[in-house]
Amino acid sequence: MSVHLHWFLPTGGDGRTLVDRHAYTDGGIRRDRITPVSGVRAPDIEYLAQIAKAAEQLGFEAVLTPTGTWCEDAWLTTVALTQVTERLKFLVAFRPGVISPVLAAQMAATYQRISRGRLLLNVVTGGDSTEQKRFGDHLDHDRRYARTDEFLQVVRGVWGGKPFDFQGEHYQVDGGLTALPPDPLPPVFFGGSSPAAGPVAARNVDVYLTWGEPPEQVKQKIDWIRGLAEKAGRTVRFGIRLHTISRDSSKEAWATANRLLDDLDPDTVAAAQQALGKSESVGQQRMLALHGGSRDKLEISPNLWAGVGLVRGGAGTALVGSHAEVADRIEEYHALGVEHFVFSGYPHLEEAYWFGEGVRPELAARSLLDAVPSPLDGVPAANGRPASAPGGAPLLFGGGR
């Protein structure tokens, strides 16, 4: 089983500190409680194209594009980026509660033809009622997962190439059909840590995603989902969502993490924790429990740092260390059964280079990667620095402020 490496498209804004994204979008936190920051990069198409092209050049298989109030639409943004890339796949996040499953199946089929088969789907059920209501969705947490279950049954049914009927609590479809089914069928990624989420994953999805918890907790999740899938007569693969701070030495990596932490004042952290604490998402509550809102003991497992989660919702942990140490941790998760790794970093353009030129060769040397053509393969580093930036991380800036 090889490792599949993916990157992230910051369609809600990017920058050099952990608070940049919130500074650009507000992120549900009152703006007057956020320390002003500089260097915010707006998520315009030119900047996102830089990241997508870098990810492709560096050998990443796909990029995850988020969904929600504070992001650009993932479908429209990524289909535009298929026109400026060649091999890169796009893991498009969307919420099943705000779109017809038959229409979603048709959109996926069209996307596959436009992109020549480069679509992956990330189904986000949604763990925050306030956010869901912005889109007209008023179901409670568990009923949202029940609806997702039906949604995925309908999507797969109408991909069958003949009229499909379905009668459920949330969807009633008569003769649903995707006249030209997608080829290939896009893999379905899905995450959820609640009891309501597990059976949905076991019955319907190809890849179960977890946020970056310590290895023992990740193992418990894998065992849970794998057991449910076996009872359903299915096999599910596994992925993990993490940030990364990888440098030529461990000292440099931790210095970068500490600088990100130094940029956070107590009011910003308190405001973020207050907002995130209201989430109904079990996964979000598990992320918050890793640090408890405190700056103390943020290295919760070797090279696993919970500092990002002090202000960021969703994925709140980062792998921090030398390139070899980060590769060690990836290998550790891989040994548990994790196949897909979805990474990100601040800023996303520069960190893609640090990881792609530092960690990826380490993984390749351990025979954990399938061969992916890259113009950077075999290019030597200069003075211990990434080859494309002899003086340090590449300073490539987009159209942000």
Image (tube, rainbow, N blue to C red):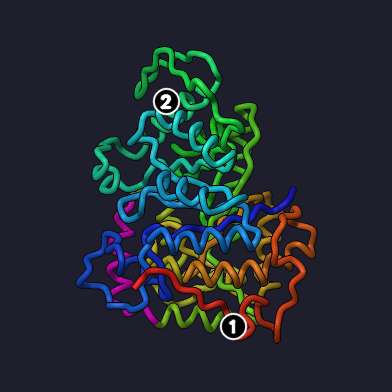
The answer to whether residue 342 is above or below residue 181 is below
Q: Nearer the viewer, residue 90 or 174?
A: 90
Q: Looking at the image, can residue 289 be seen?
A: no
Residue type at the position of mark 2 = Val
Q: What secondary structure is the stretch in magenta mostly built from?
A: helix
Residue 312 appears at what percent x and percent y?
A: 39, 64
Identity of the residue drawn at 54% across and 36% down:
112
Q: Is residue 272 magenta?
A: yes
Q: Looking at the image, can residue 17 be seen?
A: yes
Residue 388 appears at what percent x and percent y?
A: 64, 76
Identity of the residue drawn at 41% across and 67% down:
14
Q: Which residues are magenta?
A: 263-279
Q: Which residue position is annotated with label 1?
A: 392
The answer to whether residue 234 is above or below residue 400 is above
Q: Which residue position is annotated with label 2?
A: 102
Identity of the residue drawn at 46% across and 49% down:
78
